[in-house]
Amino acid sequence: MNAPAKIRVTSLYQFASFPDPAALRGPLADACAAAGLKGTLLLAHEGINGTIAGPDAGIEAVLSVIRALPGCAGLDVKNDFVEAMPFHRMKVRLKAEIVTLGVDGIDPTRDVGTYVEPADWNALIAEPGTILIDTRNDYEVDIGTFPGAINPRTSSFRDFPAWFRAQRAALVDGAAAPKVAMFCTGGIRCEKATAFLKAEGIADVHHLKGGILRYLETVPAAESVWEGECFVFDQRVAVGQGLAPGTHALCHACRRPVSPEAQTSPLYEPGVRCPACANERQDDQRCRYAERQRQVELATERGEAHLGESRGSNGRRLSCPGAGPLFE
C-alpha cells in the first residue's frame, strides 16, 4: 500500500508596497481555493505574511501568484511536511500591519537596515562598540540568545518602540556613530525594527537575515556562538543547533516555554498550568484546560491526532489553527 502523500506547510513573508491590499484579497483567496490550500495570509499596505498548507503543486501555484505581486519576487519561505492538514479553512485577512509595531509611517520597503548573512554575523557582533539587541519577547529571550545581547524585557513587539525611546540615551548617547545589530526568530521583527530605528535617526543599523533559525541551520556548530535554545511558534517549542529539537515543553495555558527544571515543579501540570502562569487563571479556565488535555491524551492513546494538532515530517507536533506559525 502506498504511503499517504504528505502535506506541505509553507510560512512566508515579504515587506512590499501594496497601495490597495484590499484589491489583492479576492484574487489571492481565489488562487488559494483553486489550489486546495488552507491556512492564513495577512495583507497590509506594507506587504504579506502567513502560513499556507496543501499539496506541493498547489503551494507552488500560489507562491507564483504571490511572487508576481509588486516587490515580492524575492519572497522568503520556510517549509515543513505533515501527515494531516493542520488548518480548518483558508483565510486571507486585511491588517494594518503584517507584524504589529504600532508606529505610523514605518516602511521597511523605503528605509531598512543592512541585511547580514548568518556567515557574517559573528564578526559583526564581535566588533567593539556594536550594540546588540534581541527584538523578541521576554519569554523567548529567557531560553536562549546571543552573548552580550540586550534583552528589552518586552511582552509584545509593539512594546519595542517605547522601550527604545525610554532607553535611547543609555544605549546610544555618547557614541559618535552608534552601530546597532538586531535579531529575531525568522527575520520579520528585526527587519521592521531596523526601519523604526532609522526613522528615529540611527543610521548604522543591521539585522540578521533569515533570523536565528537560519543562523542555527547554516552556521556550523563549531562556529556558532548562540547560547541556549530558540523558541519557535509551533509545538517543537524550541530548537537548538542544526534545528535539532530542544528540551522545552509548551504550556498550553499561557503559551510560554517550560524548561526541564520547571517541568519537575509541582506547579506544572501538562496542558493545564506551569510555574509562570499558576496564579494567572481562574478555576473554570483550569477545568477547560484539563478537559482539553484529557481529550488530547485519549486521542494519543488511539493513535489519532487531536483536533487542531498535526505532526511534522520528523514526528513533531505543529501548532493548532489560530496559532499558526506565521513568520516572527
Image (spheres, helix red, strand yellow):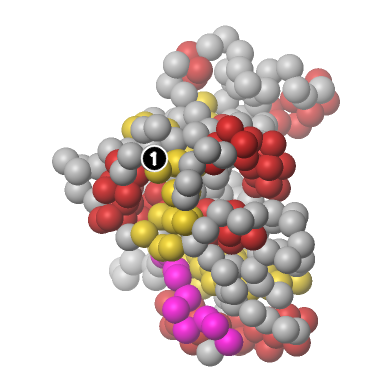
Residue 47 occupies which quadrant of the picture? bottom right
178 versus 194 height, above or below: above
Residue at position x 36%, y 59% in the image = 116
Query: Which percent across, then down, holds residue 166?
Result: 69, 36
**Which residue corresponds to the image point at 45% horizontal and 41% vertical from the top-left?**
131
- Of all residues shown, which one is farthest toward the left? 222
Q: Which quadrant, please, contains the C terminus?
A: bottom right
85 lies left or right of 276: left
Q: Which residues are magenta?
A: 69-79
Residue 73 sits inside the magenta stretch: yes
The residue positioned 71% from the left and 75% from the top of the image is: 45
* Amino acid on which the number 1 mark rests in the picture: Gly
SS class, disc 1: loop
Residue 297 seen anywhere in this rendered image of the structure: no
Secondary structure character of the magenta stretch overall: loop
Please say if 282 is above or below 206: above
